[in-house]
Amino acid sequence: MVLVLVGAFPNLFSQNTERVYLSGTDASNTVSWDFYCTEGRNSGRWTKIDVPSNWEMQGFGNYNYGHDWKDKNRKLGKEHGLYKHTFEVSDSWKGKVVNIVFDGSMTDTKLKINGKQVGQMHQGGFYRFKYDISEYLNYGKENIMEVDVAKHSSNESVNQAERQADYWIFGGIFRPVFLEILPKTHFVRTAINAKADGSFSALVEVNSRKQGYVVEVELFDLGNKKVGKTITASLKKDVETSISGKFENIQAWNPEYPTLYDMRISLKKDDKIFHAVTRRIGFRTVELRKHDGLYVNDKKVVLKGVNRHSFWPETGRSLSEENHLTDIRLIKEMNMNAVRMSHYIPDERFLELCDSLGLFVLDELTGWQASYDSIIGPKLIKEAVLKDENHPSVIMWGHGNEGGWNLANEKWFHFYDIQKRPIVYPGISKNGINARHYPSYDYVTNQFISGNDVFMPTELLHGLYDGGLGAGLEDYWNAFESSPLNAGGFLWTLVDEAVLRSDKRETVFDTDGNHGADGILGPHREREGSFYTIKKIWSPVQVKPITINDNWDRKLILENKYLFTNLNTCSFNWKAVKNKMNTVHEEIVASGSLIGPDASPGTSAEIEIPDKTALQKADFLVFEAIDRSGNTICNWSWPVKQPQQVAKEKFKKTWETNNIGVIEGENLIIASVKDIKISFNRIDGTIQKVDTGKGEISLSGGPVPVGVNSDVKSSKWHLDAQGNFLFHVSYSAYPGYIIWKLYRNGLLALEVGPITQELRNTDFVGISFKYPESKCLSVKWMGQGPYRVWKNRTDVSSFGVWEKKYNNTITGESFEKLIYPEFKGYHANLYWMTLETTEVPFTIISETPNLFFQLFKPEKNQFNTGGIQPPFPEGDISFLYDIPAIGTKFKEASLLGPKSKKRTFFQRSFEEEHSEPIKLWFDFGNITN
């Protein structure tokens, strides 16, 4: 057993609450109990199980997803788990009150101590409940506890609220079990409402009526230094007493400055302490101002949040300290300030970490799309409030989800919560907060124009596979920031909920089709592309858009999007970088660090790069914002030259003057220079074969126009006055023409005519080539990277030089080998790329600004739905003016905002309105530098 003194102070040892763990403290520190499973795997015999745990993850019972109840082809496991455990009880506990506390048990739980039934069966799987077992114990001896846990409840409303849900359902004692040893006279409850100005009120409840007793309140900082004076109040005749007061010079709690204090509350008579508890609290004020906004510490706040299931692939809903820390660190790294507990009360430790590390929390009663009845519901609301009421991070309660509420039960939140926190109804508009789920972009803009409630979608942009989340977020967020009714929102969801199925012939990770593959992160917290888009869009430091060129004044305008932090607490690093083609090596030509300007939240300020010559030799500029703790807030990068300038710099100064040979065949035209021999289709000008003299390159079948219908009209070739080979092909529509030009030094240039016609509702427009995917090893390139992009998710990447090896990751499915960034897909703003292959590597250089390139086609997910499978052009390597957007599980891309809509190219006959031609250079012989 593990002994913990809860809120202990050395001079109060005997008066503090003792906590003795009968189980382990978390999923990484378990204790073995005797166990018997009634059906499914490893059932029908007594064995051992780790506690806490979900028994499915320990090899027992049946795996079920919450939708299985309505699928006749799936067995719905209704097993019981029977637990036995012996524990010693100290003889010194006689005369004290001993409670046994369960922090979470799924779901109906019956307890026996030494063969005797204790209390009533508890129903509800995510809540802390306790029994007074003082009279059942054998003091100074061993005691036997027996626990019967039913995976499904005998109360149908519990099953509907918890078991028939869109998430994995498990069984078992999945959170700790401990003994709580209290003095005979003790506090039953100490609820604290600590305000931002240092004032507080507390509701204290003792276990019996006491006269002549006083309640004493002291405050300490986390260094155990006393703050202010002791505040006292006489205990009334009732078991409940209110006490209030004020501490001066308090630092208020908020997620950017999560200042905490220890409040020690003592029950005394005649200077004798009978019981003392210490509660770690933060002083902060929460207020929903209807038709206005959500205020914390009298400051209107915007929540940048995410939904979080308690989940790990190998342990289910039983989590470790490291699991909690990992999630919170990743949430904060994405520049989020809030998390929604979907769809149940979290572990005690998770909220303690949110308090200390700084996150707003929407704490939620279970009820996926159905509610608890009016008998069970009030009991579970009480358990939820009493467990989590003193956490400063908890600023709102969620009353179920998407219909998972019983309106008759709302009053119990108000009854128990002395802070009177706002109560949200996720999915609808109620109590002054519109928490609509998965609103279209048009709904959002209309809400801000004609709506009157504070707007805070509790599920925003569903993240199935690679859709939603970062994709579309920029347009949504711009709309949000345009309205005073904006209170932010919560993305769905943090992780792909893939269970490691040990019951399969081959162990696999299972998301139950497309039900659980909704995350920004993979099941082991692998970062999908949207992680970086969210980080950039929700960065509390923003850089106003700029173009860097020779006339740039070296000034950046910074916008402070923090809620409580001045930018003078931040620092900024910059570097000007030069790159040599075909390598990812960075040559830093200049760099420096800057102190943040004085800019309070909601204001802007300039910052200047001091080095006047820094960019003269650079290819791109990198700028990084650092918070006061030394963590990167965000980084930005910009090219300092146009693609045409970079292209010219990459060619060797001396151009060799070799003769070009041309052979005409019936179907081919073969042009050769040095050791390079290139075969073209003589009708349409497409490459058929490349021989470098050192081996073949299987690039072929291009350029072919994609995104339009166009026929070849004619083709011709000739040698120009300098002896270079030119091949001209004309088309009936886009691109009008293509021109190949093979230079006498071996470089091959391609010019593809601009768009000169009206093209409406295009997914993509450009040209494509074929190349065998099986021969590809890796790619290096200068441009946006390293993650792939969609039209509505280009902020996923930064400009620079990148490299990634070939992989075949299918986002949301490739859990056995989940490699990020994905190799295949669209990429942005190409300057040059080098493809490493099993053949001879080759390089393609672009002179066209803002050119997208495609590398092969990502494999389709098995369970596609909605708009999460955008189209790709025919061919393997494409160069494009435009690419498609990606949608979500519930919305086609066109419903997600302006950047998600298909593009219309509308061209008049005026030359200045034409698009830029696509101009590419092909280096098959390592000619460029």
Image: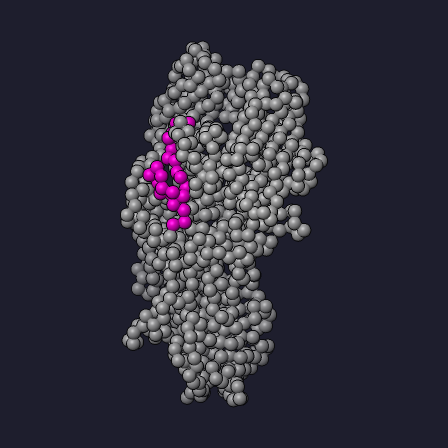
Judged by its main secondary structure, the magenta piece is loop
Residue 423: within the magenta? yes
Image quadrant occupied by the N terminus: top right
* Region in magenta: 416-439
Residue 3 visible to the viewer: no
At x 45%, y 47%, the residue is 492
Total numbered labels placed on residues in the image: 0
Percent x, y of residue 345 = 49, 36
Query: Is residue 278 depicted above or below 535 in this figure?
Result: above
Give percent across and percent down for residue 485: 31, 44
Q: Image quarter for residue 97? A: top right
Give the x, y percent position of residue 676.
Answer: 54, 81
Colouring:
one colour
Q: Answer above or below: position of 250 versus 783.
A: above
Q: Residue at x 42, y 75 (%)?
A: 709
Q: Of residues 84 and 513, which is closer to you in this image?
A: 513
Q: Is residue 5 above or below residue 810?
A: above
**Magenta residue check for 829:** no
The part of the image, by quadrant, that contains residue 222 is top left
- For image coordinates 36% across by 71% down, the residue present is 759
Q: Can the viewer see residue 773?
A: yes
Quarter holding residue 70: top right
Question: Outermost residue toward the right?
Answer: 45
Q: Position of residue 917 (x, y in %)?
A: 38, 74
Q: Nearer the viewer, residue 837 or 387?
A: 387
Relative side of 8 to 440, left or right: right
Q: As rendered, which of 388 and 152 lies closer to the eye? A: 152
Q: Residue at x 53, y 61 (%)?
A: 860
Q: Is residue 289 above or below residue 439?
A: above
Q: Is residue 462 left or right of residue 52?
A: left
